[in-house]
Image (cartoon, rainbow, N blue to C red):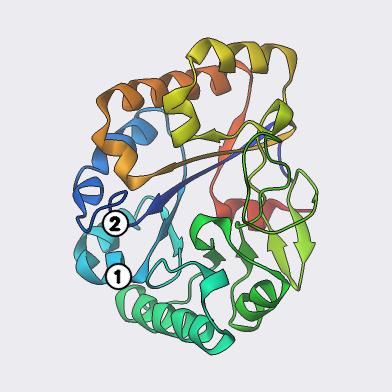
Amino acid sequence: MLQNRTCFVSIDVEKDLKKESFEGVKSLDKILSLFKKYSIPATLFVTGKTLEQYREFFLDVSKDYEIASHSYSHKYWNELSFLEREKEIKDFISLYQSVFNKLPLGFKAPSHVIDKEGLELISKSGFLYDSSIVPHYPPFKKYRGYKGRRPLFPYDQSGILEIPNTGQLMGIPLAGTWIRKLPLLIYRILFLINKPKFISFSMHSWDSLNPELILKIEEIIKILKKNNYKFFNGEQILKNRK
């Protein structure tokens, strides 16, 4: 059973934003060292192409953190046919097994772009949970992911557990891009007036390249701890659900 205040922590690990480099992956320890400092478990949603290039690194990281799927190539699923999506999944699972000698438990679609057919596909492929859906989104921000409102806490869907990307009031995400842009005071005020039972705290590997953001991520951790949030990765949420 999950705690009264649960925070799901994850990092999307992929090529650097708008670049073909992996400098964010090389600097990932800057974020992981914070997690170690505060004893925070996390799930790393890694693309197959990243895992392929940094096998030994992720094999070592897997001793402390869950490694899950962020698809094979990070292509948006709304641009792929069913067969192309199926190949993405098969290629990732095959690679994952060759590295870790086991099957991945979790999946997150690139840019949260997923639909009912996609959810059914990853369920049939053996994944036990998904974390692609944003259940509520700021009304002033366009969202191209799964359409329609969904529960703000983990729930069963299409035969698997959905761990939603739940945000704060008005759907403001607790995510790297937003944390970088918003003053910390905004988040302090939000948690002062609203303490969601479940919230997702996410970032990208390339966020590790921004020293100012690293400092803000640490402050967010302090805010969450001050408000008595307990931190979980995807596998732990899967095991602790009712």
Give the amino acid at mark 2: Lys
Q: Is residue 116 above or below residue 175?
A: below
Q: Is residue 10 left or right of residue 50?
A: right
Place of residue 2 in the rendered image (x, y in percent of width and height, measured from the top left): 71, 43
How far apart, in angstroms, are the residues tagged by discs 2 and 1?
9 Å
- In the rendered image of this protein, does residue 202 appear above or below residue 217? below
Q: What residue would you read off at disc 2?
A: 15
State the SS at label 2: loop
Image check: 224 left or right of 220?
Answer: right
Q: Identify which residue is drawn at 45% across, 80% down.
A: 88
Q: Residue furthest bottom?
A: 83
For disc 1, the marked residue is 49
Q: Could you say where residue 5 lies in the image, as x and y percent from the top left?
A: 70, 31
Contact flag, marks 2 and 1 (Cβ < 8 Å): yes
Residue at x-position 30% and y-position 54%: 61
Q: Nearer the viewer, residue 27 or 178?
A: 178
Q: Amino acid at mark 1?
A: Lys
Lower sequence index among marks 2 and 1: 2
Above or below, comparing residue 41 to residue 93 in the picture: above
* Residue at the image point whose x is 30% and y is 75% from the top: 99
Quadrant hosting residue 186: top right
How far from the left and from the top, in percent, is residue 190? 66, 17
Q: Secondary structure at mark 1?
A: helix
State the residue at coordinates (25%, 46%).
24
Residue 113: which numbered mark, if any? Answer: none
Which one is in front, 13 or 16?
Answer: 16
- Residue 242 coordinates in the image, percent (x, y): 79, 53
Other-residue count near label 1 (Cα within 10 Å), few / some / many at <14 / 14–19 / ≥20: some
Callout 2: few (<14), some (14-19), or many (20+) C-alpha neighbours within 10 Å? Answer: many
